[in-house]
Amino acid sequence: MSTCLFPGSFDPPTMGHVDLIRRAAKLFDRVIVAVMVNPDKRPMFTAAERVALLGKCVASLPGVEVCAGEGLTLELAREKGADVLLRGLRGEGDAGLEAQLAAANRHVGGIDTLALFTAPEYGYISSSIVRDVLRHGGSPRGLVPPEIESILREKTAAQGR
Ligand code: ADP
């Protein structure tokens, strides 16, 4: 059984992330999406909220599961029995950092990283753009999966994040 682990912040999940997960689900028997807790970042949404949001986005995709993780991604990959790590590339901006991360994970954990290019229509989308839109009361329509659009707006408005 082939398994990939897709680690990220997903703060919040976007159309770009979910498109990547959908495509990976066709390539792998199991896709484990891992919301990684990074102590250096102050996320807009808690890890539990991000897991729940992703859960809604991938509910109809067979073989896809969502979890939270902390510490070394490669340890989590080992724990979950993943064969490779999955990452997304939006262009040259992502490529340099992703290559460095992939090399480090291969060196330290002996695990390879597979990168999928973004679908061109989602190439400009990032979680930080979505956070900006939400903070300023804008609509994230088209940037995030429709399943979580209103939840994101409600959470942002109610809690003044
Ligand atoms: P991280 O903080 O680990 O980069 P992100 O949630 O920002 O977490 O991104 C997780 C992964 O998804 C990264 O590999 C990133 O390059 C990829 N990604 C982010 N946005 C997109 C997008 N619009 N299209 C394809 N891949 C994306």
Image (cartoon, rainbow, N blue to C red):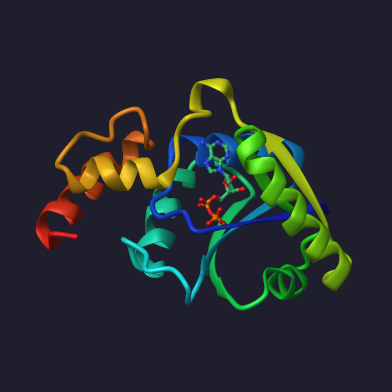
Instruction: Determine if residue 84 is in view.
Output: no
Q: Position of residue 103 (x, y in %)?
A: 82, 58
The residue at the far top in this view is 121
Left or right: residue 93 versus residue 116 is left
Quarter of image, res 46: bottom left
Quarter of image, res 69: bottom right
Q: 47 or 61, which lies in front?
A: 47
Q: 11 or 65, which lies in front?
A: 11
Q: Position of residue 115 (x, y in %)?
A: 73, 42
Q: Which residue corresponds to the image point at 40% horizontal and 55% vertical from the top-left?
A: 11
Q: 140 or 80, which lies in front?
A: 140
Instruction: Determine if residue 152 is in view.
Output: yes
Which quarter of the image is occupied by the N terminus?
bottom right
Q: Which residue corresponds to the image point at 25% horizontal and 48% vertical from the top-left?
A: 152
Left or right: residue 69 versus residue 42 is right
In the rendered image, the vertical position of residue 125 relative to residue 53, given as above or below: above
Left or right: residue 7 versus residue 112 is left
Instruction: Tally the numbered discs.
Output: 0
Which quarter of the image is occupied by the C terminus?
bottom left
Q: Position of residue 71 (x, y in %)?
A: 61, 78
Q: Position of residue 39 (x, y in %)?
A: 48, 77
Q: Which residue corresponds to the image point at 40% horizontal and 60% vertical from the top-left?
A: 50
In the rendered image, the vertical position of residue 127 relative to residue 77, given as above or below: above
Q: Which residue corresponds to the image point at 75% horizontal and 55% vertical from the top-left?
A: 100
